[in-house]
Image (cartoon, rainbow, N blue to C red):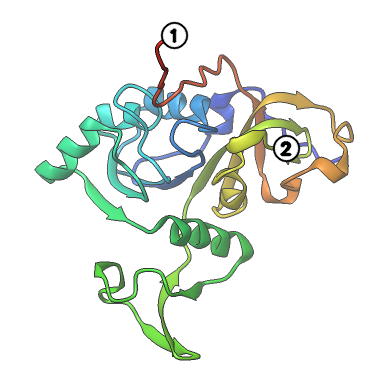
Amino acid sequence: MIQKTVPNVRQALEGVRDGMTFMLGGFGLCGIPENAIAELVRLGVKDLTCISNNAGVDDFGLGLLLQGHQIRKMISSYVGENDEFERQMLSGELDVELTPQGTLAEKCRAAQAGFPAFYTPAGYGTEVAEGKETREFNGKMYVLEEAYKADFSFVKAWKGDQAGNLIFKGTARNFNPCMCGAAKITVAEVEELVPAGALDPNQVHIPGIFVQRIFQGEQYEKRIEQRTVRQKE
């Protein structure tokens, strides 16, 4: 039986070094690999390029790596909740590549599937298309986008087994699935790790072939990014 389990986050991140490119799943603060991010902070690796839809908030998620000036370049779609990100970007400390959200997802998915590039209409005629090849299909213009190249993908799932099969829960099924297998090494942290064969194959979202290492995470905070309540009547 295939065994991809590692005992803890430290062994899961073995081989992480300065200057690497990482994919990190999650949408806002939902479904982010909290344990992997905490370990990256502890390791103190720097000059990182991070591919993630969001940049966390000031004191949580990728915001923790930004606090330590560990990220050199951020490739994201939406970054409006992080004051430190804004400060570093405006001061020139941080290189930022803003990408349309669907394009970001597809660049991950293309890497997962082994496609080097694809055409998309998103961004044509804007700064997004500057310096890129464009082509007309059926009377509509498209931009050529290359798939991402990353050293590690860090994803978070609700449940997984020892063979690396994953099930995501609710809206945590966002960028996590398309980042699995999109890097040289995919590390999955799960809330519950079960023996191989314990999962219903019909419920599996990502097969274990896309995962190289899996471990059970600890102490998930699951913070709410913006809490809005109304007054009691």
Sort mark 1 into few (<14), some (14-19) or many (20+) by Cα contacts within 10 Å: few
Percent from the top left, x then y, of residue 121?
Answer: 43, 74
Q: CA distance from mark 2 to mark 1?
A: 38 Å
Name the residue rendered at 48%, 65% in the picture. 147
Check disc 2 and give the amino acid type: Ile
Q: Quadrant of the N terminus?
A: top right
221 to the left or right of 92:
right
Asked whether disc 2 touches disc 1, contact meaning CB atoms under 8 Å apart, the reply is: no
Name the residue rendered at 62%, 52% in the picture. 181
What label sits on residue 96 in the rendered view? none
Check disc 1 and give the amino acid type: Lys
Q: Quadrant of the C terminus?
A: top left
Residue ID for mark 1: 232
Looking at this view, is 160 or 211 the one in front? 160
Asked if residue 160 is positioned above or below residue 125 in the image, the reply reads above
Secondary element type, mark 2: strand
Sort mark 2 into few (<14), some (14-19) or many (20+) by Cα contacts within 10 Å: many
Q: Earlier in the sequence, mark 2 or mark 1?
A: 2
Residue ID for mark 2: 167
Percent from the top left, x then y, of residue 85?
Answer: 24, 37
Percent from the top left, x then y, of residue 52?
Answer: 42, 45
Residue extending furthest top? 232
Name the residue rendered at 37%, 33% in the picture. 56
